[in-house]
Image (cartoon, helix red, strand yellow):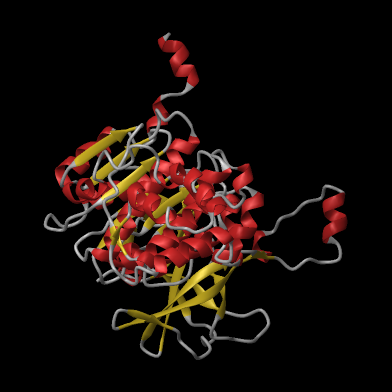
Amino acid sequence: MAVKKAVGRVLSSSGEYHWDRVEITLYKNERVYRGEYLYVEVDGKRVFLQVEINPIKRPTSSYDEKLTRDGLVNRDEEREVWKASCWQVGYEEDGTIQPYLFPIPPLCEVYRPEPRELENFLTPLEPSITVGRIYPTDAPLKLGLKTLVRQGLLDCGGEGTGKTTLLLTILMALMEQTPRDQPIHVMVIDWDGEFNVPELVDAAKKKGGYLRLEAPMRFKKELKITPKEFYERVRRYLGLAPNSREARKLNAVLMRMRDQAIDWNRETYLNLISQIDDPAVESKLREQVDIIFPPQSEEGWDIRELVQENALVHLDFSNAENWDEIILTSRDALDICYHEARTNPRFGVIVVIDEVHNFAPQNIYEAPASKEAYESMVPVMKLLATTGPRNKIPLFVATQRLSEVEKVVSTQMGQNIFAFRVEDIDLERLRGIMGDIASAVRMLPRGHALFKGHAVKVRTPIISVIDKLAEPASVHKDLLSAWRRG
């Protein structure tokens, strides 16, 4: 049996002891890290704590400032007391974490858990994937797979902090760490070619198949939907208010059809608007047909079949002509998959998008694609963020500018969030999702992230070091290396 490692005792400077906050006086030469997990044993329970701050306490005499000013410095380490202020995390009971609701008594000895003990405390009982290590230990950070695909994931951080590497690590873990008999289906929307990674391609081929589509690409849209769904889709794509003349006229035509299934295609749309009794409205809606159904959009790949036949479908837009092509084609793929997932109990796909602020911007006038493209795309992204996971189409998204992501999307995706170091302008949005602990990300080095979410057993943030299982393609494409090759 391993010997327990004691680091100090519970001792409050104020003389008061509470259940939620615990102050620790550390033994001489013992140190703890901010965010580290410790525990006490009380009433037969192992109650875990997490270090919030780790200050040094040193009483200051009236002469200290004068002596320091005059350069007569005598540190006198015997006067220094190393402390730790902790939040209570709780104790485990039947696989769930429960709070200990009585004050933690004074002078209880405080221990540092072994990596295996910490892993058992944090890791959910469901099947999981390992994405990194819990700082400052070697204990693996494991995320519950069922919870992850039920809720989705948001990954944010500044340029070069490791956020794209995290997405690659998660993709590699899905391909390599899940049981052999567990099918996995992922669709990566790759706007700049960062996911053209040999390790990922090989892992996906072994798991169930890999297919890469290059821009330009078009998808079949052979869908049967109700008139109400047809109306909502047209209104969403064109950005029509429910009380607009166009929306009311179209709805009047569709109401005559009751609930019979109709084809979602260009021909049906043109046939329906021809029945509108207002020539001006009909003309306007006819002019906008290409926004909903780009020419020849009914010819091309059946994205539903491709997803079901492969572990990973890679939509590579690095050769796209412009951002409108990227946004509108991605919208088609997402819309088709969402509708299929809702109607087909055997269909589902994880959607991975890097730099999601380019796909669901807070301000469409400051984003790279046109206003018209975003008016059709943003409602789809909101729909996926809010109802996608429960309909078997969760989003795993990353962004370097959290403040520029459409707020509904960022808020809904915050149930499982990794935060690398971010710019100050993004901290406010991050605090709204994670709480005040978000301020700690400003000090995180490259490759370190703060995780908070339901995919582990605790609801407190965890500082983690992300495993680098593969590197983004751009790592090997820097300008200086290109000049050397030239």
Which quadrant would residue 148 be assigned to in this image?
bottom left
Number of labels in the image equals 0
Which quadrant would residue 15 be assigned to in this image?
bottom right
Is residue 282 among the parts visible in the rendering?
yes
Quadrant where the N terminus is found in the figure:
bottom left
The image shows residue 322, relative to residue 387, as above or below, that is above
Closer-to-camera residue (466/270) = 270
* Image x and y of residue 62, in percent: 86, 66
Closer-to-camera residue (162/221) = 221
Quadrant where the C terminus is found in the figure:
top left
The image shows residue 471, relative to residue 52, as above or below, that is above
Taking the spot 21% from the left edge, 42% from the top edge, the residue there is: 203
Is residue 467 among the parts visible in the rendering?
no
The outermost residue toward the top is: 486
Q: Is residue 398 left or right of residue 365?
A: left
Q: Is residue 342 left or right of residue 233?
A: left
Q: Is residue 307 left or right of residue 60?
A: left
Q: Is residue 61 left or right of residue 8?
A: right
* Image x and y of residue 265, in percent: 33, 50
* Image x and y of residue 252, in percent: 46, 67
* Image x and y of residue 415, in percent: 45, 66
The image shows residue 294, relative to residue 178, as above or below, that is above
Closer-to-camera residue (188/27) = 188
Closer-to-camera residue (34/9) = 34
Taking the spot 49% from the left edge, 47% from the top edge, the residue there is: 359
